[in-house]
Amino acid sequence: MKIAKYRPVLTASHISHIVSLCVKDMSSDSLSVISVLAPFKAKIECNALHPAYVMQEKQTLMESLGFENDPNYIGLSPPEQKEKAYDKWLLDPNFCNADELTKAREHRYVNYLMTPQEEAKFEEDLQKKVSGSSGFLNV
């Protein structure tokens, strides 16, 4: 009789956790699992066994585009983020990244903090951005 076997992808901490749960249970199935995983655990702990592969942490879309996930903005609504970026811009625009400069500029526009010339330039840039995009937004 053939027995189907599967190969899961587990981290060292997963293997340790499963072994510790099986030790507490000590049923016949648990003993069978322990007999397979305990040697793996021991080999991993003494660096005698290397991982089959190492997964890289997946980047967010913002990270892949070069923006930083600033922990100072986590949990803030978009208007709050823009206000915070504006406050930073007021202190020194040179310390703002591209994302913060954009947020500060949008905050200034929405809250009527721009000169008429700056508003005209902002609207012109926005129109270029919209007309340059693909899809149904083209006018």
Image (cartoon, rainbow, N blue to C red):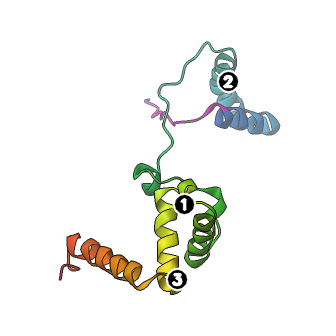
- Give x and y (percent) for residue 129: 28, 71
Q: Residues within 10 Å of mark 2 (few under 14, many from 20)?
A: some
Q: In the rendered structure, which amino acid carries the disc numbered 3?
A: Leu
| Residue position marked by numbered label 1 in the rendering | 93
Of labels 1 and 2, earlier in sequence is: 2
Give the quarter of the image for residue 73. bottom right
| Residue position marked by numbered label 3 in the rendering | 113
Given this view, does label 2 or label 3 mark the residue nearer the observer?
3
Q: Quadrant of the N terminus?
A: top left
Give the quarter of the image for residue 31. top right
Given this view, does label 1 or label 2 mark the residue nearer the observer?
1
- Calculate the distance from the C-alpha at mark 1 to the C-alpha at mark 2: 52 Å
- Give x and y (percent) for residue 96: 54, 57
- Calculate the distance from the C-alpha at mark 3 to the C-alpha at mark 1: 16 Å
Which secondary structure type mostly characterizes the magenta part of the structure?
loop
Q: Is residue 36 above or below residue 117?
A: above
Q: Residues within 10 Å of mark 3 (few under 14, many from 20)?
A: few
**The magenta segment:** 1-12
Query: Dot 3 lies on which element?
Result: loop
Residue ranking furthest to the left: 139
- The label on residue 63 is none
- Give x and y (percent) for residue 130: 27, 76
Which residue is pictured at 49% across the width and 84% down the height? 110
Image side of residue 96 versus residue 72, left or right: left
Q: Is residue 120 above or below residue 22?
A: below
